[in-house]
Amino acid sequence: MKLTNLKTLGKIAITGLIASILPMSVNAKDTVKVGVVSFLTGPAAGPFGTPAKQGAELVIDAINSGTMPAPYNIKGFAGATMNPIFSDESGGGTKQVGLFRDFVQKQNVDAMIGYISSGNCMAIGPVADEVKMLTIFSTCGTERLYEEKLRSHVFRTQGNAVGDSLAAAKYIADEYFKGKVSTADKMYTGINQNYAWGQDSYKFFKLGMAQYMPSAVGSSKPQFPKLFSGQYGSEISALSLDKAKIVHTSFWNGDFEAFMLQALVRGFFQKKILVSSVGGSGVDSLDKKFPDGVIMGTRGNVGLIVRNDTTPLNKWFIDSYKKRYGAYPLGPSYQYARAVMLYKIGMDKAAKAAGKFPTQDQVIAAMKGITFESFADTIEMKRGNGHQAVHSIAYGVTKYNKAKGEPGIEKVIKYSASCIYPPAGAISQKWVESGMPGRKCN
Amino acid sequence: MQFLITVLLDGLIYASYLFIVSLGLTITFGVMKILNVAHGGFFAWGAYLASISIIYLGNNEYNSFLYYFAIFLSAIIVGLFFGYIIERFILRKMYNEDIHLIVLATFGLFWILEDLILHVFGVDPLMPYYPAMELGGIELGGIFQGVYSLTLAGLAIIVAFICWYFLKKTKYGKVLQSVIFDREVSVSMGINVTKVYLITFIIGGMLGALGGAYIAPTISVSPGFAIDVVVMSFAVVVIGGMGSVPGALIGSLIVGLVRAFAVHQAPILELFIIYAIMAIVLIIKPEGLFAPPKPRKI
């Protein structure tokens, strides 16, 4: 009797053990758990974090159900369904590093996707390598991420911010300063937020102008108001009194919209030409009040720039996004979706090569140096030892589309990656200052 | 000449904005001796409530006069509602606690009010630009200024006058001055200090909300935008003297004019110079330029 009981207990224990192990091994192939981090609270949530989350959500659902157009029409990530865990990016680098470790060590995620703030990317990059967690940065722009150190587990599907500023300078030189003779016509200034993003954006715009248009003169009083200061009356007056006609800005979110509102009622745009590298969300917020004639970039071929692009993947994305969220996808929607797409391609390629569900190292090897089709352009992971993307950058001029009753853009020029990004291994600032050796512009 | 006129106008507009926001803060401190960090919450709620009202009125093409009615009504509603709840049910229970605890409580209340905004209004920015767009711009000193922004100066003058009249010419103003001077003596003279505290906190909240509501048509109203406003108001109040209405006025003018001059002449110093002035004032006159006299207690 005693022996029979022991046997029964043994059977139950073995059955239990198998039952507890079996779902784990099945889960490892059926689902991938991924942390998706963007600003869900604070000033960056509206124009960046929420559209970013929505872009990722839309593409994840489409890939999980196999309804996304080719080449992403094979269901799942190496056959597995992605289970995204959305998290808020607010709170600064220290908090985000803590949350990142929590994702990796407690929630046992398979990968991390997202991050908008350059400060957060700089804080998390080294930690991702330390804990060996595959991390795909989608939006942050600082060039320092790969120029200070190569990363083993970190990828970035967004070109760095250097390209945004250089493309802006090239557009100005090509379209506005050509043939101008008077000094005032060839002067430029800027209004940028007083932190790394704003300072770096204007620095590279200025460096770019020195290369593309050496006779152009930068103002001695560019404006650097505090981030989120909201009131720009004095700055608008100072810019109005400045002789420079071109005004560069990397303002984003409420700062951009507040500046536009305050400048609009003061007739600013009748006298000055604004070039904005990242103000895409403000165009939709202000809608028909947004002035025509603003030179607008969107950090790649995304958002407003590609609104009329009929590439099947882009058309699907715009239509599906509008249907689901009732608005056009913005730049961050594309950027987050793009990061998810790289993960999908990496997983599928690694699984095919391995003939089974891939390990993280196999996925990293598959993603390294890859070229993949995005919505309206091609992304090449050709910098940072195959971990950093480069892509073309487009600028155009805002023009309200009366027929469609929505904001539009015209005179779009695309600059190829080889024209606006330094070659692999080069340091951006040194490369620009030394005359951009090897650059090839279309 | 053009430069001087422009700096003066820019400085006055910015000073008017700072005065309206910091007035509520300094009145609350003067009477209740509470550094109300939650003041930023009143500012934000005023801006949000005015924004949704103006957007509704603008989208439905109501009379423009109603925009201004909505702005003042929003300030009154926010001040009354949150002011009453916070003073009556939270602060009143803490008056005998350490002053630092009360500051921490208002700090917590600020974040609660901010978080409530996310739940009620969401994360998308609001742009109630109708009043500012309708008034357009006017050329003064060679460059265009926004007419709506210029009306801020008018509002600040009206608010300052009402405040002066109320404090100097009315019975309740004298009661208020008595409480500012010495709470205990006021109680012994039969003044209902509890009631004075409640009314003062509500009025302070209304002024904070009015600042947010009036400025809303010129900005993008988004979560977290009030934080910097509170910090700047503290600088104004510290320069002028905690609890002093003339101090808030002079502090606002100093900050507004110096900042405008810096933006035109040395933009990179615009923030540094404000806090440099604050530091100098704290070194030379730690109680601020116009701090109300303190009774000598034996």
Image: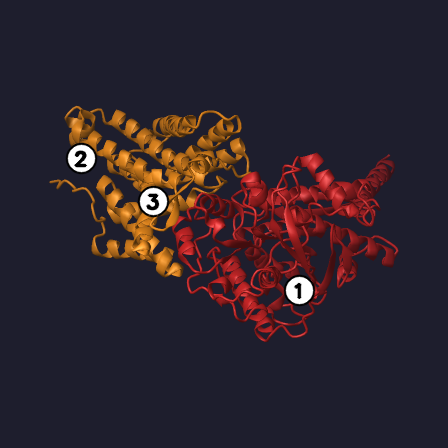
Chain colours: A red, B orange
Which chain letter goes with mark 3?
A: B
How many labels, in total?
A: 3
- Which image quarter is the N terminus of chain A in? top right
Place of residue B247 in the rendered image (x, y in percent of width and height, measured from the top left): 23, 44
Q: Which mark is residue B13?
A: 3
Discs 1, 2 touching: Cβ within 8 Å:
no
In the rendered structure, the residue with mark 2 lies on which chain?
A: B
User: Residue at the spot x=81%, y=55% of the render?
Assistant: A358
* Snapshot quadrant of residue B296: top left
Does residue B44 appear left or right of residue B150 in this picture?
Answer: right
Picture coordinates of residue B49 (x, y %)? 45, 30
Is residue A104 something one can see in this rendering? Answer: no
Against B147, residue A247 (above or below) is below
- Residue under label 1, please give it: A151
Give yes or no for contact between labels 3 and 2 (Cβ–Cβ under 8 Å): no
Q: Is residue A80 above or below residue A189?
A: above
Query: Residue placed at 49% from the left, 54% from the top?
Result: A272
Q: Are marks 1 and 3 in contact (CB under 8 Å)?
A: no
Which quadrant of the figure has residue A349?
bottom right
At label 1, the amino acid type is Arg
Q: Kindly identify which residue carries mark 2.
A: B182
Return the disc, 3 or 2, that comes first in the chain's sequence.
3
